Amino acid sequence: MSNKNKNRNGIVYSTNPDFQFDKQEEDETPDSSEQCLYVRREVRNGKPCVAIKEFKGKASDLKELERKLKAHCGTGGTAKEGEILIQGEVLDKVRALLQKLGFKTKG
């Protein structure tokens, strides 16, 4: 499916000639002190990583948090669908930075 039709909530075609699809605005990102992130060590494809789940907010804010975590830990990673994966055994570094940024952590 192409990206232009990705967020249409199942609407593919309308017979109404005056129909205008209303694009929904991205949700506002709650303040970091209002969010509780689940941080845990996982093994994916046989390699250790740290998974940060339950992020609520804009995709751009998720990418910004991912960039900060990767720079702080000196490793690679990815962010998609409200989840951030940071490569390596860096659980303590990730938790420390998230708490420094004001996030509550569990896991």
Image (cartoon, grey):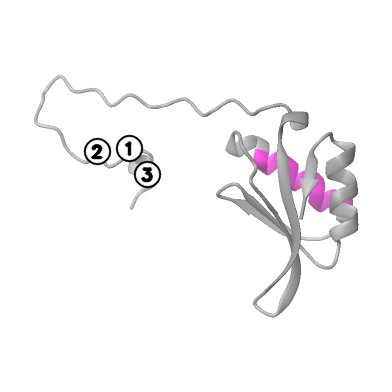
Q: Amino acid at mark 2?
A: Ile
- Identify the secondary structure beneath mark 1: loop
In the displayed structure, 48 sits above or below 62; it is below
Residue at 90% x, 54% y: name it.
Answer: 93
Left or right for 70, reference 14: right
Specify the quadrant that holds the C terminus.
bottom right
**Residue 18 spot, x, y in % from top left:** 15, 19
- Residue 11 disc label: 2
Residue at the spot x=63%, y=51% of the render?
Answer: 83
Kindly identify the residue that appears in the image at 81 percent across and 67 percent down: 88
Magenta region: 62-72
Mark 2 neighbour class, 10 Å CA radius: few under 14, some 14 to 19, many 20 or more: few
Q: Amino acid at mark 3?
A: Lys
Residue 85 visible (yes or no):
yes
Tags 2 and 1 in contact by the CB under 8 Å rule?
Answer: yes
**63 magenta-colored:** yes
Q: CA distance from mark 3 to mark 2?
A: 10 Å
Disc 1 + disc 3, Cβ < 8 Å: yes
Residue tagged 3? 6
Residue 7, percent from left and from top:
38, 39
> Would you say the residues marked 3 and 2 are in contact, meaning their CB atoms lie under 8 Å apart?
no
